[in-house]
Image: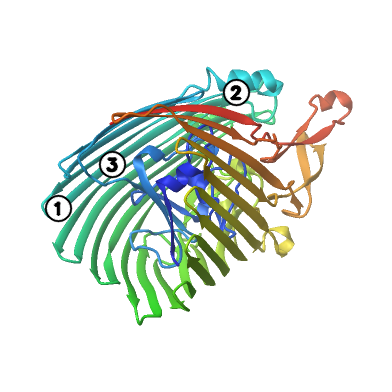
Amino acid sequence: MNVLTLSREQIEASPKMLGIADPLKAIQFLPGFGNGGDANSGLIYRGLSSGNNGYFYNGVQVHNPAHFFGLFPLFNTNVIKEVNIYNGVVPGRFFGRLSGYIDIESDWGIGDTTLFRGELSLFHGGAGVRLERDSSKLLEVFWRSTFMNKTLWPLVGTVMEDQKGLNYDLSDLNVNVAHVYGKNKFKAFLYTGKDKARFDLFEGNVNNGMHWGNTVLGLTHELDLREGLLVESSIGYSRYHADVALDFLGDDFTLANRQRALSLNTTLSYRINQSRVETGFVYATDILESALRMTQEEYESGGNRYNDRQGLLKYFFSVNNPLSERISVNLSTALSYIGGDLDKFHFNPAFALTYRLNTYSSWFGGASIAQQATHHLPITSISIPVDYVIHSGKDNSSSSMRELSTGYRYAKGAVEFSVDGYYRWLSGAKEFDGHIIDLNDRKDINGGIVDGRGVTYGIDFFTKVLFLRNYLSVNYSFSRSFRQFDALNNGFWFRYTFDRPHNLSIVNAYKLSPRLSLSASYALSSGSNYTPVLGMYYFNETLIGEYGTKNNARMDTYHRLDLGLEYGLKQTAKSKQTLGFSVINVYNRSNPIFKHFSYERGYLENDGAFKMSQKDGASIPILPAVTYTLDFL
């Protein structure tokens, strides 16, 4: 009950954004996950935001798992085997998040083959090689790069007059190496990528620039001590950086964001029949740096800075054991020490029980407690590369969550069905106390953070039908999420930004013939919440906004249909060619990403009067793509 798995084949069965399969977008069609909206890389899981999830690549933390605001996949499906999503009783090597853990696993299987792969679309190109020798050696390299500045953006600028200044391209590189020697197996991997953009965020004739990138690398050693007894040791390092220069309502300012993490893990596991015992240690250190600068004088002095280092030491123990033919139990416990935290020691127990009703169906229930000492504080209603991230400290407590869940599952033949219910209590929830610009007046970012509490609850329905030629899944989730802060909204409860009660998603992949496959996906969800601006006025040489009740307005309902078609070209014993067509947002639905407000300047010349207008942020228009893939064996 504590893990959902998506294989590479399932990921590739969904329609592809810009002609490329995306593991994180495929996850949005699983139970419990909500749609974060277009241009939002984050995953909403059981009423909590993306910042409450942990994203890992082969067990190593990834700070911002997105290219192109989530429109282009950070993780290359060509080099991965599967995606595992954990909740409740999670493997001991994961740490530091309240909601769920998404771990992208490379394909470490070793045979004796050689594969060359190339892919080309209207917007990107990629090439890679996978070398396997003697079932003991593996080398895999894959590079990708877009050329949208030559193809996509000139077209968008022609269709959308206000987007003529848009420029954006990205690139990334994946390297995997493995070697098996007797009872030893060594695995090493590297991911590095970068994005560079120039865009008009609010209005024309404004030069806004942004670039960011991730580097993730790791080394793992596995040793089979004897049958069923395995020790695994790993070291991982990740780095993230983002820099933004904006003209924000007439004020020039820059934002910088740096995150670095180093982790060491040793796990001893013992498996006998269907029972498994696991224990070990994790050590991690996390360094966060951010800066906000609005004037040349502040630029020279560093402006509003945040710089902090936090260390974690964790011991964990877990047992997964069938007590009888009908009953199985899965429990874990972890004790963590977090340096600099207000409450340095954290105890996190988790428990899950499964009762098999018959051969085809089972009931399950679980309870868990989790803490999070690193807080993601979005500055908009979507996740962007320069969102603030801070540590808990002597004046800033960790966030805590208690969860109860229960459900029923049925699986027989080609049909699977599940229903899950959950209730979550949060304490130490974090929010900004005001507008992002107010942070510039503070020397300490923590001074703009307030503590509160929250609840989230819901029920998920999921059905999957798998026939020889057809794969169909239907997911509906009802979820509510509320917050209460003494310092916000006069102390009254309010809807959380990501309180989106209704989420419906449908995926269908149909194999029309041995060569031709058709895929379609449909998503519908409630709009996200925002605080409405009732009016703006000019007082004492300052523009002041008057706001309504916090998060009391909701954007329009989100819905979108995507289609994909793949045709296998001439195939030989040594080569395979595939031509793919995809259309995103088939009926060109205008789904707002955010709300923003503009006004006519020159109010001093008009006796202080000006006109204000509210607009929806841009969404993804209908977007076709063509992709050609060539494999040489």
Position in image of residue 295 (x %, y %): 58, 29
Residue at the front extreme? 513
Q: Amino acid at mark 1?
A: Asn
Residue at the spot of label 3 = 189
User: Which one is nearer the viewer's eye here, 148 or 379?
Assistant: 148
Picture coordinates of residue 449 (x, y %)? 58, 54
| Neighbours of disc 1 within 10 Å: few (<14), some (14-19), many (20+) | some
Q: Residue at x 41, y 46 (%)?
A: 8
Cα distance, mark 2 to mark 1? 51 Å
Q: Is residue 275 left or right of residue 564?
A: left
Residue 31 is at least partly visible in this image: no
Mark 2 / mark 3, whichever is N-terminal: 2
The residue that mark 1 highlights is 184
**Most extreme residue toward the bottom, as rendered?**
324
Relative to 621, is 297 on the left or the right? left
Q: Earlier in the sequence, mark 2 or mark 1?
A: 2
The CA span between labels 3 and 1 is 17 Å
- Residue, x 74% and y 46% (percent of image)? 556
Which image quarter: residue 141? top left
* Three-letter amino acid code at the position of disc 3: Phe
Spatial separation of the CA atoms under disc 2 and disc 3: 34 Å
